[in-house]
Image (tube, helix red, strand yellow):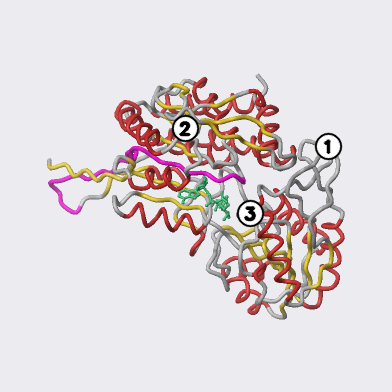
Amino acid sequence: MAVETKTYGLFINGEWQDADSGKTFAVKNPATGEILARVADGGVAETRRAIEVAHRAFPAWSRTTADKRAVLLARAAQLMTQRTDELARVLTQENGKPLPESRGEVASAASFFQWNAEEARRIYGEVVPTAFDDRRVLTIKQPLGVVAAITPWNFPLSMVTRKLGPALAAGCTAVLRPARATPLVAALTFEILQEAGFPAGVVNLITGTDSAGIGTELATNPLVRKLTFTGSTEVGKQLLAQAAGTVKRVSLELGGHAPFLVFDDADLDKAAQAAVLSRFRNAGQTCICTNRVLVQRSVADVFTAKVAQLAGGLKLGNGLHAGTQVGPLIDERGFAKVQEHVADARSKGAAVLTGGKPATLSDGLNGYFYEPTVLGNATTAMKVTYEETFGPVLPVMTFDTEDQAIAMANDTPYGLAAYFYARDVGRIFRVSERLDYGIVGANDPVPVGAHIPFGGYKESGLGRENGSEGINHFLEVKAISIGL
Ligand code: NAD
């Protein structure tokens, strides 16, 4: 059935259900303003019920064999891959990103299920050398319990599988609350989990408009043993404070302000292409997007001209249309922030090298389109150089020495991703080690994948997702000491 004609329910205890109130809310296409589908408007009572269901399902699920969990997750990965065309289309419609980016997101989302299917079989304990000859000590790893997961709209599919994958692989049960703007691919993921054969109650979906109410229930309910959140630093801090009352385990993937350093020995063509890819994919609405370029003065003019030319040539439009490279911003709030940041930078002396205004709309478009923008003469007084813009705006600043570049790059409360382009191998090691960031792309604008630990230093978050350590955040370590 076409997504446009459907109403999606909550998924609790293996059943699709209406909200208690019977209410639904509309999901809109940010490129056209059209209503795509309606979704059940669940609230606090339904969230509490889903948590209780997940709690009841936990003992049996936590005792399933690693093999069984691996088989189910691998099946879910396969079903997701089979539905790539449909998922990518819905993702583009609800989020706005161009179709090739959505297809890439489906592939990475499926890979997170697959990776964790494999990780399920490698939850090893240890035999610990003993301090007492009349005892033996070993450790085992056990699932935490009910996991609450809250995900954002900018990667509405892959953030869901990046959380549910390791939770299910570890033997936890889960309640997911996807972002209000983008619940459709999350609902399709639950169809996939149901078809894959996960038992009733193991995974539950709560959609709804009451973000604060649902979030508070998930963060404070004592039956929830772990909260995993991806979203803004502001909301992450609130949830962390709320979770303290029941000492929940908390993982946070929050905002960033990624610097992109270009040194005088860099391949400037590759660096310019990488900076444009890193800033303008998903219309700049990616937590690891480049937020500011820092370029060495001797190559600044040449590099900046290349970046402005590439950015100015990007094709804006409906993500479903062939050739579109940049889609709309998600909503009015995001659009207003971009306008405010550009106005602020201009008033403080920035030079608009390309873009700098909302795009002229045509071709049935009725969304929040902003021209890809490059700003020269940027200074640290401008908001765009220290606040997350979350839009298609790239400020360029200059530096003279490596030390100065590092100091400028690290001068932020954020520490998620940083990039640099250089060819000197000594410099590649020095700079990689000195950047206070959880993810460093050295001559690599997309340093992500199921095999790579993902997470931030400082106020960009707590914990890591993906990589071999990802699953550990869903497990407790138990020490067992045996008297002989
Ligand atoms: P957001 O914090 O507004 O929302 C994230 C999620 O939290 C959504 O599901 C939202 O509905 C919910 N939420 C909103 N208010 C809440 C509240 N008071 N209590 C509980 N839940 C609440 O963020 P967003 O605008 O959806 O996403 C953009 C932000 O997410 C950016 O800051 C971006 O950098 C960050 N992000 C980080 C990562 C990462 O892995 N570090 C990945 C993607 C996005």
Amino acid type assigned to the residue bearing label 1 in the image: Ala
Cα–Cα gap, marks 2 and 3? 26 Å
Mark number, residue 322: 1
Q: Nearer the viewer, mark 2 or mark 3?
A: 3
Going from the N terminus, do you reach mark 1 or mark 2 first? 2
Left or right relative to 39: residue 5: right
Mark 3 element type: helix
Examine the structure image and report whether residue 236 is included in the region drawn in magenta: no
Going from the N terminus, do you reach mark 3 or mark 1 first? 1
Find the magenta span and give its range.
Answer: 131-154
Q: Which residue is mark 2?
A: 205
Going from the N terminus, do you reach mark 2 or mark 3 first? 2
Which residue appears at 51% of the width and 41% of the height?
209
Crowdedness near tag 2: few (<14), some (14–19) or many (≥20) residues, C-alpha within 10 Å: many
Cα–Cα gap, marks 3 and 1? 27 Å
Q: Position of residue 112 (x, y in %)?
A: 55, 38
Q: Is residue 69 above or below residue 352?
A: above
Do the CB atoms of the residues marked 2 and 3 lie less than 8 Å apart?
no
Crowdedness near tag 3: few (<14), some (14–19) or many (≥20) residues, C-alpha within 10 Å: few
Q: Position of residue 391 (x, y in %)?
A: 69, 56
